[in-house]
Every structure is written in structure tokens, then in C-alpha cells.
Amino acid sequence: MKILVTGGTGFIGRWVVKRLLQDKNQVWVLDNLANSSIKNVEEFVGNPYFKKNIQGDIKDEELLNEIFQLNDFDVCYHLAASINVQDSIDDPKTTFENDTIGTFNILEQCRKHHVKMVFMSTCMVYDIASNQVGISERDPLKPASPYAGAKIAAENMVLSYYYAYNLPVVIVRPFNTYGPFQKTGGEGGVVAIFINNKLNGKPQSIYGDGTQTRDLLYVEDCADFVVVSGYSDKANGHIINAGTGEDISINELALLISNKSTSIQHVEHIHPQSEIQKLLCNYSKARSLLKWEPKISLEEGVKKTEEWIKSTKETYKEEEGQ
């Protein structure tokens, strides 16, 4: 197929691109590089199925017109977004323009050219888990941050195009994704940050009391889920979760990663009002609809992620001649 991936140089995006190329799809990438790097897709240059990497913005309607008119896409995986909760609290306008208006722009192009759209949403749209079997797609939403609010608004627009125009769409809500190519700094995920702190001998700083839990999904499992949702006609018109069905507290995660080699300290939460205390995924819909199951355990995923972070540090030292 001919496929466009917005946000394709980002953390999850580059793994989605890799999986699509492995399946011998022709892939175009659109990214403004605001929260990613061209280096993330360097390994694909030279692959005959990797057609073009376009630096541009989903708010640029003229550019979108040109891209969709020139290429007869079958599917658009729409991953481009502002994803930082604190940034959305500090600057809600930017998050709304990127995540809601930008999504509308992509939707309009998909409608005009009848291109299936897979929309990357987030588990952050949910309220707390109402039971021990985890959060399902039927559980209540809670826009506790402008990021979550912008994603919910975008989800509703996406579904409206399914009902109003019969446009094939899928909304995917992965839970907390981690793995190689995730940033290790302030905008990164908790696993990457904890591993980086461990390798640098820094203490693990945990927001609040650390009892909040996360369902941690390895990035290659996440990418497989996202990709197969675009392949499946059965998924059209659906909202689908992906996770492991197991959660771990942030305190336990810090101990697992640190292996008692670094100290742990608790600090004041920067956005307690947007915290979801228990994030546990019920992915039974993905299992029944897509035949999808996560394959990588947390222990194995942490090991793979640590190996990658170590390799990037060694590469950086070699480049610097250290």
C-alpha cells in the first residue's frame, strides 16, 4: 500500500514506519521535527519502499493539499501531535492547534481523497480504572489536562467523519509506551528517564508518593498494534486500547530499574490535577478484533531499552572523540 505517516520521525512513529517497511508498503513521512529528529529514520534511507521524508507541519493546509494530490495514499497513520501534559497546561493554545485543528486538517484531506485514517490518541483521556480488570474503551473519560481535552475533541471529529462521510477511521489509545528512541530528558517517558538517571548515577525523582501505577507497553508491541489496526477493515469505526493488562507502581518501577544502585527521592508533583492514579489497560477488544497480543515483558523491554540508551551514549562519546 501507499501510506503516509505523520509524526513519522517521532518515538512511536519511527517504529510504525519500520514495521510498515518490513511489510513492503511504500511509506511517506511528514514531520515538523519539533519534538523529534531526522536521525530516527536515517536507517531507512536507501530502502526502496521508503519514498520520502517531508519536513512540514500538519497546520500547513497548502502543503497537505500538495502531498495528498501528488500521492494516491491508501492509509494515513496520523501520529503527529503535541504530547507533553505540562506543556499543554502552560500553553493550551499550541496543543489545541496541533492536536485538534491539525487533526481536522488531516481528516479533510482523507475525506477528499478517501484515505483510511488511523488516529493516535492516548490513555490520558481516561478517568481512573473503575475495577481491577483495567480500563476498557467503555470506561468514562476525563479531560484532566488540555492535552487530554484536545485529544478527546480530535477523537470526536475523527468519529464524526466515519458516521457523516463513511470514511474508514480507527482511533487507537495505547497505554504508556516505552523503548528505544524515546527521549531520556524531561519530555521523555518514565522508563527512559529512570534508566538514564541510573546510568548517570543520579537519584530517581518520583512525583508525589509514587503509588500511582502505569501499564507499560513496549514500543515494538505498540507499533504492531497501530499498524494492524490500519490493515484491518474490522477495526473501522472503532476505538481500541493497547496495553499489557498489568500495571506497576512508579515506586516499584524505580526499584526494578535501579536495582538499588541509585537513591530514590519523592518530589512535589508538577501537575497533580492531571494525574491518573491507576492506569491499567483492558485490551480484550484489541485481542478479539485484531488478534493482537503484547509479546515483550516489562523486564525484557527495560533490558532492551537500557542497552539502546547505553549504545547511544557510547556513540556520542565516539563522535566527540572522548
Image: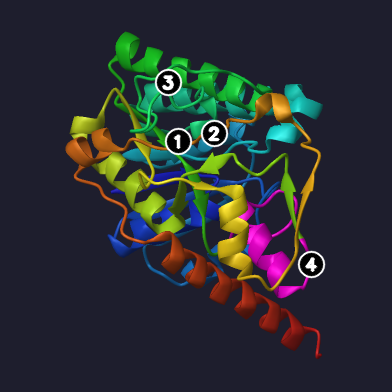
Q: Residue at x 60, y 49 (%)?
A: 250
Tag 2–tag 3 contact (CB < 8 Å): no
Q: Position of residue 201 (x, y in %)?
A: 77, 73
Identify whether 149 is placed above or below 320.
above
Give the number of the disc on residue 89.
Answer: none
Residue 10 appears in the figure: no
Which of the marked residues, 3 or 1, is nearer the chain's N terminus?
1
Residue pointed to by mark 2: 64
Q: Which residue is mark 1?
A: 68
- Quarter of image, res 167: top left
Between the C-alphas of marks 1 and 4, the distance is: 47 Å
Q: Whole-percent x and y of residue 203?
A: 78, 63
Disc 3 designates what residue?
158
Q: Earlier in the sequence, mark 2 or mark 3?
A: 2
Disc 2 residue type (three-letter): Leu
State the CA–CA distance, disc 2 to disc 1.
6 Å
Indicate left or right for 44 with 252 as reference: left
Question: Which of these two is toward me, 11 or 184?
Answer: 184
3D distance between C-alphas at marks 4 and 2: 44 Å
Q: Residue at x 38, y 17 (%)?
A: 159
Q: Is residue 276 left or right of residue 225?
A: right
Magenta-drawn segment: 181-203
Question: Regarding mark 3 in the picture, which secondary structure is present there?
Answer: helix
**Disc 4 target residue:** 202
Does the CB distance between marks 4 and 2 fall below 8 Å? no
Residue 195 magenta-drawn? Answer: yes
Cα separation, mark 3 vs mark 1, equals 18 Å
Mark with earlier residue (4, 3): 3
Proximity of marks 2 and 1: CB atoms separated by less than 8 Å = yes
